[in-house]
Amino acid sequence: MSTFDFTAAAELFPARSWKARSHGISYKRFSDAAEAVRYAIEDLPPECLLGTYLEVEEERFDSGGIRRLYDCADYPLDRAVPDDGKGDGDDKPKGSSSKRAKRT
């Protein structure tokens, strides 16, 4: 992946589907792209990510591009710890900061 500026301002445009509207998802501006990527992957319902795109410095990223930015080694924020499927009773909302993997 070419150099990406995670500190640049970003805009997130939701999918134009009834699913996105029914979840109250709307256009959002972010002061930095890293937070926009985190929001899209960790906070948006998965069914709403398809069709959503991120615009940073006049470059657009579809849902696959957003996922690649989140997974890239240069991503500066802590990532949410994936659910291990054990059903430990932790019903915290998706994106809760208490379940973040620390970056090394």
Image (cartoon, rainbow, N blue to C red):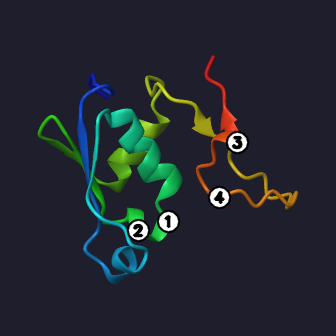
Mark 3–mark 2 CB contact (< 8 Å): no
Mark 1–mark 2 CB contact (< 8 Å): yes
Q: Measuring 76% from the left and 61% from the top, which residue is drawn there?
A: 91
Q: In 3D space, how far apart are the residues under numbered discs 3 and 1 (Cα atoms)?
A: 17 Å
Which one is closest to the eye, mark 2 or mark 4?
A: 4
The x and y percentages for residue 49 are 40, 62
Q: Measuring 48% from the left and 25% from the top, which residue is drawn there?
A: 73
Q: Earlier in the sequence, mark 3 or mark 2?
A: 2
The x and y percentages for residue 88 are 88, 57
Mark 1–mark 4 CB contact (< 8 Å): no
Q: Quadrant of residue 8?
A: top left
Q: In 3D space, how far apart are the residues under numbered discs 4 and 3 (Cα atoms)?
A: 10 Å
The residue under label 4 is which amino acid type? Pro
Q: In 3D space, how far apart are the residues under numbered discs 1 and 2 (Cα atoms)?
A: 5 Å
56 to the left or right of 31: left
The residue under label 2 is which amino acid type? Cys
Q: Which quadrant does the N terminus fall into?
A: top left
Q: Measuring 52% from the left and 51% from the top, which residue is drawn there?
A: 42
Q: Nearer the viewer, residue 66 or 44?
A: 44
Q: Which quadrant does the C terminus fall into?
A: top right
Tell me if I can see residue 16 in this picture: yes
Mark 3–mark 1 CB contact (< 8 Å): no
Q: Which residue is mark 2?
A: 48
Q: Earlier in the sequence, mark 1 or mark 4?
A: 1
The x and y percentages for residue 33 are 32, 35
Q: Which residue is mark 1?
A: 45
Q: Which mark is residue 93?
A: 4
Q: Is residue 68 above or below residue 77?
A: below
Q: Which mark is residue 99?
A: 3
